[in-house]
Image (cartoon, rainbow, N blue to C red):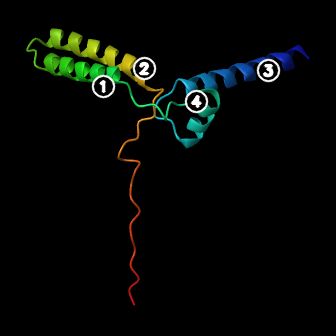
Amino acid sequence: MPFLIVILLIHCLVICFILAAIINGHNLNRFEEKIRGVFIKPKVGEGVPDALYDEAYEIVMDLGKALEIDNDTTKHDAVQMALKRVEGFRDDSKDYQIKSKEHEQEKGKLKVVK
């Protein structure tokens, strides 16, 4: 009987870890987005704040400056700092659903040829 309880607790922990990964995840598929939508309501109606655009611009400009550096060790450190900033930016922006042009494909129009 105690073995059964331990197995059930382990299953509950695994389910909790899977849900945490889905809630905090990026690039989710449709099924995972539906599960995430149950727990966290996406901010579809709200526009993306200008602060996020400004932060993204600053990150790109800093990355450009980092890539222009001639010293390899300094360049590596600067790129690593930019990567850390990008990871923070992704965490801040994952609550907003940004529609990209890749998902908005128009359906092709077919003609009937006799």
**Which comes sooner in the sequence, label 2 or label 1?**
1
Residue position marked by numbered label 1 in the rendering = 53
Q: Which image quarter: residue 67?
A: top left
Q: Which image quarter: residue 48?
A: top left
Instruction: Tell which of 112 and 1 is nearer to you.
Output: 112
Rendered view: 63 above or below 33: above
CB under 8 Å between discs 2 and 4: no
Residue position marked by numbered label 3 in the rendering = 7
Residue at position x 27%, y 21% from top?
Answer: 54
Badge 3: residue crowd in 10 Å (few <14, some 14–19, many ≥20): few
Under tag 2, what secondary structure? helix
The picture places residue 7, in percent across and down from the top left corner, at: 79, 20
* Separation of residues labelled 2 and 1 (CA atoms): 12 Å
Residue at position x 40%, y 50% from top?
Answer: 104
Closer to the eye: label 2 or 4: 4
CB under 8 Å between discs 2 and 1: no
**Which comes sooner in the sequence, label 2 or label 4?**
4
Residue at position x 58%, y 36% from top?
Answer: 32
* Separation of residues labelled 2 and 4 (CA atoms): 15 Å
Residue position marked by numbered label 4 in the rendering = 41
Q: Is residue 39 left or right of residue 93?
A: right
Residue at position x 32%, y 24% from top?
Answer: 50
* Separation of residues labelled 4 and 1 (CA atoms): 22 Å
